[in-house]
Structure formats: C-alpha cells, structure tokens
Image (tube, helix red, strand yellow):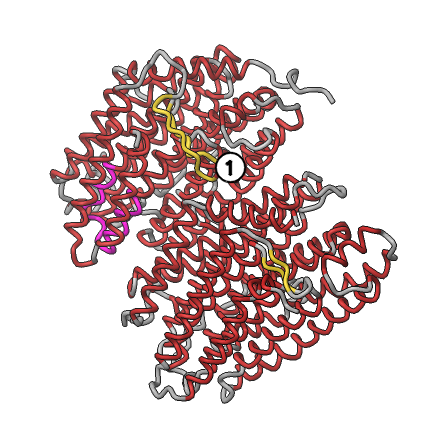
C-alpha cells in the first residue's frame, strides 16, 4: 500500500517521467527542422517542474516516501529546482548549435536531457544506496548517448567511449563501496546506515574500506584529482552543447549524493573521509589550476578550471567536522552548496557564449578565437568577462562570495591545517586568476580575427542576458541565496 | 539614500549608462555624458565637505544597512577626518581626467569613460566603507576597471603591464582576505571595523594581522621592495590611467594602514615601526636616486611617486599628530601633483608620441604657456614652499626629527634628491634651445588643456598657501586615532 505522502514526494519525478515519454512520442510527428514543438514542450515541462520544486523548497517540509527510499526535503527541492533550470538554459543555448551541426534530426537532445534530469532528480532525492545508484546510472547512460549524438564525428565518439569506460569504472567503484557498506550494516537505507554506525557495533575497518571506494566513485563523478582524467577529454571532445549538459546540472546532483552518502549516511566517519577529501582537494586545486594555464583550447581550459573549482567545493565539504564536533557543519556544507549553485550558473553563461561564437561549420574552440570579441560584440564580451572574473573570484562577482564562504568555513574550522589550506587555496586562486584574465585579455586587448558581428537567436539572447544579469545581481546581493542554502542544509542536518 | 551612497553610485550609474547605450559612432555625445556624470559626482561630494563637523572624530554621514545577513556583512558607510578629503579628491581627479582625455582617446570612448566613472565610484567606496568586507569588495573591484584601462588603451607593452598590475596587487590582497576572515571569526561574526578596533589581540596575533595587511597595503602604496610593478604599469598605462593610479589608487594602500593596520594591531605597529621606517627611508632615498637616472619621463614620475609615498608611510609610523597629519596632507598633495605631472607628460605624448626625455629639449620655446604650468608642478613635486608638495613633507620631516634626528635627516635629504631629479628633467625637456624638428613643430596647449592645467594649478597653490582647510578637518580624527593606537591591546586579552 503506497501512501499519499509517497506520491507527493515523487510527484515532480513522476511528472518529469511522464512528460519525457510524451515528448519522445510527440517528437515523432514533428517536422520542423528546429523542432519547435518539442522544444517548447520541454521548456514548459522544465519550467513547471522548477516552479513545483521551488514551491516545495519554500514550504520547507520533509517527506519520506516509499518506505524511506526517497526523501523530499528543501535541500533536494532547491537543488532540483536549479538543476531543471540549468537543463532548461542548456537546451536554449544548445538548440541553434545542435541545429547547425545536424544534431536535431530527431528529438533525442531533448528527451535524453529530460531523462538525464530525471536521473539527477532520483540521485538528489535518493535515501537508499540502490536508488541513488539507479539515478546515477540513468544520468550517466543518458549522458553517454548525448556525447555520442554526433556519431559521425571522430572526436565525439572517442569522448563518448572514454566517458563510458571511465564512467562505468567509477560506477563500479561506487557500487562496490555500497556493497561493502551493505555488508557491514545490513541495510541500504541511508538513515539506518547512520544509526547502525552510531550504535558502534560495526568494525571500523570494514566501513573505512567501503568508504574508500565510495569516495573514489564520488571523486570520479565530481572530477577531482586523481580521478579527473576524463574531464578534459570529454569537455573537449563532446559537442559544446552536450559538454554543457555534463558540466552544468549534473554537478548539482553530484553534490547532492556527496551530501546524502557522506553527510547523511557516514557523518560518524567524517574524520576519515575528510582526510580523503583533503588530499583530493589539494590535488584538484593544484593540478587543475596549473594545467589550465597550459591550455589553448578554451573547453579544455574550462575543464581544468572545473577541476580546480571542484577542489574548492571539496574544501567546503571537508571543514564540517572538527574534533568530532559538528556544530559548524551546516555552515560548511551550505558554503559548498552555494559554491556549486553559483558555479553552475557561471558555467552556463560561459558555455553559452562559446556556442554563440561557434558559427556554422566553425567550432570556436581555441582561446584565440575570442580575440577582439569586444570589438565585435561588447555585450557578449562583457558577459564572458563577467563569467571569467566570477570564476577567478574577483569581487563584486558572485564567485568571490562563493570562495569567501568556503574560506570562512575553513578558517572557522580553526585547526592550523585548515588555515594552511585556506592560504593554499587563496594562492591557487591567484594562479587561477591568471588564466581567466588571459581570456579577458584576448577578448579586450587583442585585435579581432574577424569583424563579423555575433548573431544570436532571440531566445538565446534573452536567456543569456538573464543569466548574466542574475550573475551580476547575485554578486551584488548574494545574501538571499546564501540564506536559502544555509536554511536547507540546516533542515537536512536536523532530520 | 545618503550623500555617501550618492557619491559612490552616481558615477557608477553614469558609467553603466554609457556602457549600455554608448555607441562607437557617437563618441562626442559619450564624452559629454561622461563629463556631466563627472561634474555631478564631484558636486555631490562638496556638501559632504561643507557639512562635515571638524570638531568631532566620530564617523559622519553614516549609513548602515544589512547586506549579507548570513555573514553579518553590512553596507556601512561613513567618513571621518581621515577619509573625508579623499572622497572629494577622488571625484575631483576623476573630473580632471575626463576632461584631459577628451581628445586623446578615440577608440571605444564609451568604455573608457565608463571605466573611469565606475572606478571613481568604487574608490570612493573604499574610503567610505566602515565594514571590512565592504571595504575589501570595493578595494578589489577597483582592479577590474584599471586592468581594462591599462590593457585596452595602454602602450605597446600594455598586456604585460596589465597582468603585472592585476596579479601583483591581487596577491597582496588575497592574504588580507584571510586576515579579514580571521578577524571575523575572532569577533565571533562581525565585519564591523570599529568592533575590530576594540578587539583585544595577543602579540603574535597582532603580528600575523599586521603582516597580512601589510601584504596588501605595501604593494598598493607601493613600498620598497614591492614597488617594482608601479614603473612598469605607469609607463604603459594611458595618461588618464596613470593619473588616477598615482593620484588615488596608491592612496588606497596608505589609507588602509590608518584604517586597519594601526588601530587593529597597535602593538605590532609599534613593534615593527622600525622596519616600516627603514623601508620608508629606503623608498625615499634609494628610489629617489633611481628616479634620477631614468630616461623615460613616466618612469621618473613613477619612481618619484614611490619616494613621495615613502614620506607618507614614514609619517604614519612615527606615531605623532604631526607625522600622521603630515602623511595625510602629503597624500592629498601628491594626488594633485602626481596627476598634474602625468597629465603634463600626456600633453607632450599626445603631440610627439614619445616619453623619452632625450626626445625633447627646449619645449619652452614653442609651448610657453604649457611650460609655465609644467614648471609650477615640477616645483610642487620638489616640495617648494607655497606649493602643495611642501606642506606635507615639511610636517613629516618635523615629526621625524622629533622622533629621531637621523630619521629626520634621512628624510630631509630626500628633498634634495626630489629637487634634483625633477629639476634635471625639467631642464632637459623644457629648457635650452629647441632640440629637434618635432619640438619645433609643437603647438601650445588649447583651451581644454589650459583648463585642466589651471584647475590643478589652483589646487596646488591653494593647498600650498593655505593648508588649514585640509589639516583642520583631520585634526580631531588623527588625535583620536593616535590615542587609540597608544593603548596596548595585549593586556586586555583574556587569559585562558
């Protein structure tokens, strides 16, 4: 007997599944090369779902459904809201790009994205190891197919292959870790796992053994060093629109499963996993930033920049528990959440600009392709500069406040190790500033390679401007989103 | 909206309007809008000065609104006697620069003017901020327009200069960020600067904070040995950029000492005063000597800026009324004089396109009016009595002699170097027979340039002849600051 609460908890997922199927069917009858009907239906669905999730998030209730297999709390609701908006924006940016590359012959771009989003939803809401795993697989399988959407293009196929092989291995890690946990605790339910560990009858060694695999799997999905090898190849190889699908919304879902698994499930093991995250984050900050300097391909550079940004997110996650004391934990995790959300927002705009510049038959892939963009289109150059300064963490851009909240959490953790990490992170962001500034330099200081003005369809223009405006506003008034993150994490920790 | 908010946001709003609606083919309209923006922004700062209460050391025109509630960051503005003049000075220099760049900038005029307007708003924000995080945001945000100004409108080696400027100053201020967060946590969640002033701190904590702040402010001032970015940047920056950089941006660092380093870590400031005085003296003497051998006029003025800012930091770290006020007066005077010096070089550069001293000679023959102004500013740069340059230097030297004769002696000797390199440059560029055909073909300054020079000349002379309005404003605040700095914070640290 399934109770009503369960249905409410999964209502958005059910709706999304239904609409994804409907859109797949409707698309069969669509003749227009732009797939306008599919497009409008997808956007409508995403908007409606984002609205529902925003309502869930604002009302702030926590619902467990299907015998605690899924949970709908305000953290999951907000993350899902932002994830569907991110997919929406990605679709808007990707459509003209896909059209000019013969990727719109069928509606797969839309349906696969929606299924991928469904996978993210399941990950975000999963309260059970298997459910989380199922969500993850749904997301990654959709992504593999998306990357291979241009199957006639060598690079894309290669990227898809790499992504698939490495991704499957990561899933294997995660699954293996989960099975260890199951073996040790006898349950798949995350809440029960937590209780079982707190009860203290379980051998620490077995748990840590499982934990290592879980962290490795998660690091893979996040793209943290040393599990980062796939990120640059996939970013570069995948068609830009698809790279955005991978770089944007899934980061939110990956953050959610990190929270679900490590915080909700394994918080008693925090001292163990925090050390692992510390190694991962130091490596990511170091390799990400230094490798990005050497890149000439902008997508590859952004891939390494992502790796370094993930290092920052990990810094937020690892400063929660100090000496077994979790008082400051909510502060630390909410700073990481703020970081992820603003990072996704910035990534969307960045890739949006890259796709704009990729005219028909021409991939704007090299940083040099941005030369003199300010002469060609001051608006888009301005948006890109905004993104770069934000990623570099220069105030008053939102990226600064993200870094600030993470650093604040680190220093609040108080150990000399943490303060050392804060100084290290600060120095690494100085290195980062160099390559972000280089993009600004190319756009503003160099002579343009072509004088054609950059044209964009009206819908892309509007969404891009809104995206940039939101970035700017969040930089000037970051308080609202910060409070939202803090409250939803507090609520999650309280239950 | 209070006056200070208006002073900050009016130029920024004008700048944004220019960015949004300015077009390449409407350069003239853009210039006029920018001028209106600069004039309005300057006029707004006048009532702040007029209504300022000299007798009070308290911050005035305060505005306090919650900004980021989660971190207890407030939009807290206010001015006291220390910051008041810099608000006016910033708006003034901005106006001068807008007029001075009228014809010399032809590419992307709307972005150029917008960058300067936004920059001036941000810098006023730095001087008004009473919340540590707000200060930092304004402080860092100034890097973005300056980076673009140097990179887009700069000289041949502009890209190197733009990066050097950005990364060098960013490195310094990032360490300060860690210090700010540390203070935030020590006060259990406050970014209020006044709260930080009252916070008891142990000796080691104070030393850590002092050096973390030093990293940002010393680079910005710039103090020897982290001054090397300044000559490179000045040489490549467009005239307006150099003027604003020398006149205002360097002051952000010196101002930071008075707002953060001294009152927050008074014991460390006393403890390390010897080091600071030594560095200042090296800047004054050694960098003065370096200035003497420069072939490039802009480099020469840049090194002279470093030397003059050495006076400022010297004045601060002798901890006397006279020294601190002298340092402040020197900051304002240097704002006028260095802007004027760079604009003079700009006038020549616009015509001859060379900054080399060797490319000139006998300019006075073809540009008599301009040379008269240049002479006045050169004299002010050497600190001739009755010019702005004299007052501050004299006060600092007096204070230094009172503290320690040899320190004062070293500082005073710099006056000679200052006179030497400035006058020598003047002789080589302006005096003598006409050196070459280019100089022979020079036309004297037109009405617009005359206006710019005249405004600055009036400012330089007024300040030199009657400095009372400047010192009166700061007396109460400086006295209060010194009183605060004289009290040790270590004893108040609770023992645990």
Q: Tell me which secondary structure the magenta stretch mostly adopts.
A: helix
Which of the pair A66/B297 is nearer the observer? A66
Quadrant containing the N terminus of chain B in the rendered view: top left
- Looking at the image, residue A456 lies above or below residue A335: below
**Residue A364 seen from this side:** yes
Is the residue B135 above or below the residue A140 in the image?
above
Subunit of label 1: B
Circle 1 residues within 10 Å: few <14, some 14–19, many ≥20: many
Q: Which residues are magenta?
A: B95-117
As for residue B105 lying within the magenta part, the answer is yes
Residue in front for this viewpoint, A324 or A18: A18
* The C terminus of chain B lies in quadrant: top right
Q: Percent from the top left, x then y, of residue A368?
A: 41, 68
Name the residue rendered at 68%, 58% in the picture: A280
Residue depicted at 58% across the width and 73% down the height: A139
The residue that label 1 is drawn on is B216
Q: Residue lying farthest front? A: A1
Q: SS of the residue at dot 1?
A: helix
Is residue B472 shown above or below A139?
above
Q: Is residue B424 visible?
A: no
Q: Nearer the viewer, residue B133 or B408?
A: B133
* As drawn, A81 above or below B404: below
Q: Residue A73, located in which quarter of the rendered image?
A: bottom right
Residue B103: give x, y in percent of width and height: 18, 48
Left or right: where A403 falls relative to B83 = right
Left or right, A268 with reference to B327 = right
């Amino acid at each position: 007997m399934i109770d009503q609460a369960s249905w409410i908890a999964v209502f958005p997922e059910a709706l999304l599944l239904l609409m994804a199927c409907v859109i797949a069917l409707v698309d069969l009858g669509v003749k227009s090369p732009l797939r306008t009907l599919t497009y409008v239906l997808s956007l409508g669905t995403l908007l409606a779902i984002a609205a529902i999730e925003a309502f869930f998030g604002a009302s702030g209730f926590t619902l467990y459904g299907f015998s605690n297999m899924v949970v709908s709390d305000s953290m999951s609701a907000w993350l899902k809201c932002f994830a569907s908006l991110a997919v929406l924006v990605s679709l808007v940016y990707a459509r003209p790009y896909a059209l000019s590359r013969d990727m719109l012959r069928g509606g797969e771009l839309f349906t696969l994205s929606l299924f991928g989003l469904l996978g993210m939803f399941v990950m975000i809401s999963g309260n059970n190891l298997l459910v989380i795993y199922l969500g993850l697989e749904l997301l990654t399988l959709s992504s593999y197919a998306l990357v291979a959407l241009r199957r006639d293009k060598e690079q894309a196929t290669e990227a898809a292959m790499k992504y698939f092989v490495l991704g499957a291995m990561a899933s294997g890690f995660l699954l293996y870790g989960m099975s260890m946990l199951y073996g040790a605790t006898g349950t798949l339910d995350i809440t029960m796992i937590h209780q079982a560990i707190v009860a203290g009858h379980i051998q620490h060694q077995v748990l840590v053994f499982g934990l290592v695999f879980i962290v490795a799997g998660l690091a893979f999905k996040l793209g943290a060093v040393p599990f980062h090898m796939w990120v640059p190849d996939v970013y570069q190889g995948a068609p830009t629109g698809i790279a955005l699908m991978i770089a944007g919304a899934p980061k939110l879902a990956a953050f959610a499963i990190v929270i679900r698994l490590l915080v909700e499930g394994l918080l008693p093991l925090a001292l163990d996993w925090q050390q692992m995250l510390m190694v991962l984050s130091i490596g990511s900050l170091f390799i990400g930033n230094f490798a990005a300097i050497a890149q000439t391909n902008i997508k590859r550079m952004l891939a390494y920049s992502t790796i370094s940004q993930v290092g920052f997110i990990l810094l937020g996650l690892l400063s929660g528990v100090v000496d077994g004391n979790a008082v400051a934990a909510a502060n630390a995790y909410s700073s990481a959440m703020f970081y992820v959300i603003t990072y996704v927002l910035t990534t969307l705009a960045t890739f949006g600009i890259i796709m704009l510049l990729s005219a028909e038959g021409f991939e704007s892939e090299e940083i040099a392709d941005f030369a003199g963009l300010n002469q060609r289109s001051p608006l888009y150059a301005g948006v890109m500069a905004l993104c770069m300064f934000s990623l570099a963490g220069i105030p008053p851009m939102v990226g600064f406040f993200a870094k600030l909240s993470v650093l604040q959490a680190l220093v609040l953790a108080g150990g000399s190790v943490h303060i050392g990490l804060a100084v290290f992170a600060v120095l690494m962001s100085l290195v980062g500033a160099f390559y972000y500034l280089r993009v600004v330099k190319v756009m503003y200081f160099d002579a343009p390679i072509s004088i054609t003005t950059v044209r964009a369809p009206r819908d892309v223009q509007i969404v891009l401007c809104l995206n940039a405006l939101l970035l700017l506003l969040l930089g000037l008034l970051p308080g609202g989103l910060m409070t939202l993150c803090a409250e939803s994490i507090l609520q999650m920790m309280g239950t | 909206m209070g006056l200070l908010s208006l002073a900050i946001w009016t130029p920024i709003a004008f700048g944004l309007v220019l960015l949004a609606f300015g077009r390449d083919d409407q350069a003239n309209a853009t210039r006029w809008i920018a001028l209106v923006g600069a004039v309005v922004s300057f006029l707004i700062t006048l009532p702040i000065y007029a209504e300022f209460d000299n007798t009070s050391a308290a911050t005035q025109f305060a505005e306090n609104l919650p900004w980021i509630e989660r971190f207890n960051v407030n939009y807290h503005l206010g001015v006291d006697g220390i910051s008041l003049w810099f608000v006016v000075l910033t708006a003034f220099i901005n106006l001068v620069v807008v007029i001075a760049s009228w014809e010399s900038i032809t590419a992307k005029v709307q972005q150029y003017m917008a960058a300067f307007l936004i920059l001036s708003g941000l810098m006023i924000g730095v001087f008004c901020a009473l919340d540590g995080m707000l200060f930092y945001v304004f402080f860092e945000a100034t890097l973005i327009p300056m980076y673009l100004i140097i990179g887009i409108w700069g000289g041949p080696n502009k890209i190197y200069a733009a990066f050097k400027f950005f990364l060098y100053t960013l490195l310094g201020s990032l360490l300060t960020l860690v210090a700010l967060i540390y203070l935030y946590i020590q006060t259990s969640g406050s970014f209020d600067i006044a709260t930080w002033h009252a916070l008891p701190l142990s000796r080691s904590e104070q030393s850590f904070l002092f050096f973390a702040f030093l990293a940002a402010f010393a680079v910005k001032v710039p103090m020897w040995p982290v001054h090397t970015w300044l000559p490179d940047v000045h040489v490549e920056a467009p005239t307006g950029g150099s003027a604003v950089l020398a006149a205002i941006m360097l002051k952000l660092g010196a101002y930071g000492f008075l707002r953060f380093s001294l009152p927050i870590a008074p014991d460390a400031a006393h403890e390390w005063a010897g080091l600071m005085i030594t560095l200042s003296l090296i800047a004054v003497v050694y960098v003065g000597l370096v200035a003497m051998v420069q072939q490039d006029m802009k480099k020469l003025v840049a090194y002279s800026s470093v030397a003059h800012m050495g006076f400022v930091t010297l004045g601060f770290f002798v901890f006397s009324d006279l020294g601190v006020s002298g340092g402040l007066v020197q900051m304002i005077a240097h704002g006028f004089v260095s802007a004027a010096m760079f604009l003079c070089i700009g006038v020549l550069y616009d015509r001859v396109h060379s900054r080399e001293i060797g490319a000139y000679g006998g300019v006075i023959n073809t540009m008599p009016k301009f040379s008269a102004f240049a002479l006045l500013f050169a004299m002010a740069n050497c600190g001739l009595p009755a010019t702005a340059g004299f007052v501050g230097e004299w006060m600092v030297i007096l204070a230094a002699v009172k503290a320690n004769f040899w320190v004062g002696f070293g500082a005073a000797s710099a006056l000679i170097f200052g006179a030497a390199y400035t006058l020598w440059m003047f002789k080589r560029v302006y005096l003598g027979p006409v050196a070459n055909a280019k100089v022979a073909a020079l036309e004297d300054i037109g009405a617009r340039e005359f206006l710019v020079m005249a405004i600055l000349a009036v400012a330089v002379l007024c300040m030199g002849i009657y400095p009372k309005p400047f010192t009166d404003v700061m007396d109460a605040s400086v006295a209060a600051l010194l009183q605060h700095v004289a009290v040790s914070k270590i004893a108040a640290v609770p023992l645990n």
